[in-house]
Image (cartoon, rainbow, N blue to C red):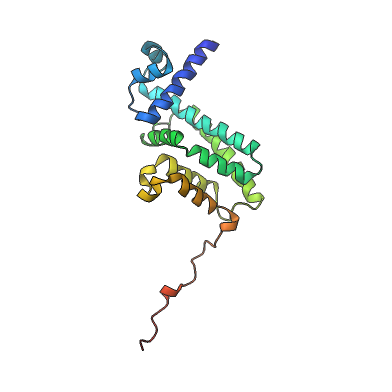
Amino acid sequence: MRADAQRNLDKIVIAAAEVVAEQGVGAPMKLIARRAGVGVGTLYRRFPDRESLIAAIGEYYVESLTEALRRAAERAPDAWSGLRAFVLWAAEEGRGALATALAGLPEDAFRGDAGFARKRREWYGLLDRLVERTRDDGTLRAGVVTEDVVALLELFTCHPGDLPSRVAADPGRFLRLMLDGFRTEAAAPFTPPPPTLWDAPPGPVS
């Protein structure tokens, strides 16, 4: 692909991601073309239908997560700082809105997309290695696994509507609190807690 054609393609996908984050996957194709600075004909030559454009947005989104995770792992002073920085970055409002829009698609929307599956495996592998580093250096509490980090991300990015209203009013604050709970210093046993005062049977009434 020629360099100018690649630039046009990149502009379309980035503009489409922005518009879908703002208006959802049903956003008008004309608006996407206008945001990208190309004609509608150019948009449809690159992406003959909405499904192919959404697939490209999905790949772009996962690729952006991969690059951000790689930067966090390489540049942070330690593994925990890198993991924390990545989770907070991924949950920022604009990126969270795009994740929410994509999460609303049918479960099999990306199932046949080999590019999306490959990029997702790459992202997950990087995340898994970073989680392993935090476990090796003792900053991640025992029992926390990569799937726990993914679940936390999905809750705050893909399904914000499932958050209680008080959490949804200030999601960044509660995400930080929950991240702190992943650290060794905050750890409490995963076993059932001992009986508390209010669990004890009532004493004799005098």
The residue most toward the bottom is: 206
The relative height of residue 204 versus residue 156 in the rendered view (above or below) is below
The relative height of residue 101 versus residue 188 in the rendered view (above or below) is above
Tag count in the figure? 0
Q: What is the quadrant of residue 58 in the picture?
A: top left
Residue placed most toward the observer, 98 or 150: 98
Image coords of residue 129 (percent x, y): 61, 42
Image coords of residue 77 (percent x, y): 66, 42
* Residue at (35% x, 20% y) in the render: 31
Image coords of residue 158 (percent x, y): 41, 40
* Residue at (40% x, 22% y) in the render: 52
* Residue at (43% x, 35% y) in the render: 99
* Residue at (38% x, 87% y) in the render: 204
Q: Is residue 92 left or right of residue 29?
A: right
Residue placed most toward the observer, 98 or 147: 98
Image coords of residue 69 (percent x, y): 57, 36
Q: Is residue 30 left or right of residue 14?
A: left
